[in-house]
Image (cartoon, rainbow, N blue to C red):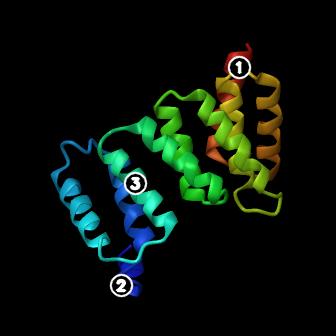
């Protein structure tokens, strides 16, 4: 990260992603340094020329800091309507919807996003693996199995696919 920010000190998305991941891994209410860093960045960002995408991600960070995981998941879902291959938004939509218990959103977001990927895309398998989990959580085992097979055929070592298929096999016993 040090090299990345040294190369581009105004890398807005890099800062947002870094702060979002820090917020995701901790309790934002008790992490005073993170609270300060986010407030400082939000103040700084007022004088920055931000894209629509960056503003959306900053809004999601704000929801994360307020521990409003459901709203955070919805914001990432909104991002993916305009930017369906934003892999950070895709992963964050997946994790926040899972943590918020929004099983239908987990399935629906991945089901919509997957239509924008082709086999030649790097994250094709990973998206299908997350879709597998979404289907499994909605008791659509046949669809989950198909998505899992596609995912494993493309990316055999994808940990989320393996995890999703483990859930599926457990549910089908």
Pick whichever of labels 1 and 2 is earlier in the sequence: 2
Give coordinates of residue 146: x percent, y percent: 83, 34
Q: Report which residue position mark 1 lands on.
A: 139
Pick whichever of labels 2 and 3 is earlier in the sequence: 2
Q: Which of marks 2 and 3 is in front?
A: 3
Query: Total number of numbered labels?
Result: 3
Quarter of the figure with the N terminus: bottom left
Residue at x-position 26% and y-position 59%: 38
Mark 3 closeness class: few <14, some 14–19, many ≥20 residues within 10 Å: some
Residue at x-position 45% and y-position 58%: 57
12 or 8: which is nearer to us?
12
Q: Which mark is residue 101?
A: none
Give coordinates of residue 27: x percent, y percent: 27, 41
Label 1 to label 2: alpha-carbon separation: 48 Å
Mark 1 closeness class: few <14, some 14–19, many ≥20 residues within 10 Å: some
Give coordinates of residue 172: x percent, y percent: 74, 16
Circle 2 — which element? helix
Q: Residue 6 carries which label?
A: 2
Q: Report which residue position mark 3 lands on.
A: 59
Disc 1 vs disc 2: Cβ atoms closer than 8 Å?
A: no
Pick whichever of labels 3 and 1 is earlier in the sequence: 3
Quarter of the figure with the C terminus: top right
Residue at the top extreme?
173
Quarter of the image where one finds residue 28: top left
Disc 2 vs disc 3: Cβ atoms closer than 8 Å?
A: no
25 or 63: which is nearer to us?
63
Classify residue 160 as left or right of residue 145.
Answer: left
Label 3 to label 1: alpha-carbon separation: 32 Å
């Amino acid at each position: 990260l040090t090299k990345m920010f040294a190369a581009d000190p105004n890398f807005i998305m890099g800062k947002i992603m870094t702060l979002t991941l820090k917020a995701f891994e901790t309790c934002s209410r008790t992490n005073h340094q993170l609270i300060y860093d986010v407030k400082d960045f939000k103040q700084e960002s007022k004088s920055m020329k931000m894209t629509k995408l960056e503003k959306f991600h900053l809004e999601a960070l704000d929801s994360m800091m307020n521990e409003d995981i459901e709203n955070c998941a919805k914001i990432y879902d909104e991002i993916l309507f305009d930017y369906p291959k934003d892999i950070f938004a895709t992963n964050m939509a997946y994790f926040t919807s899972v943590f918020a218990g929004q099983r239908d959103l987990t399935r629906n977001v991945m089901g919509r996003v997957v239509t924008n990927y082709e086999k030649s895309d790097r994250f094709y398998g990973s998206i299908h693996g997350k879709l597998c989990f979404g289907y499994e959580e909605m008791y659509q085992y046949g669809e989950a199995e198909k998505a899992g097979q596609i995912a494993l055929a493309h990316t055999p070592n994808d940990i989320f696919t393996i995890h999703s298929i483990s859930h599926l096999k457990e549910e089908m016993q």
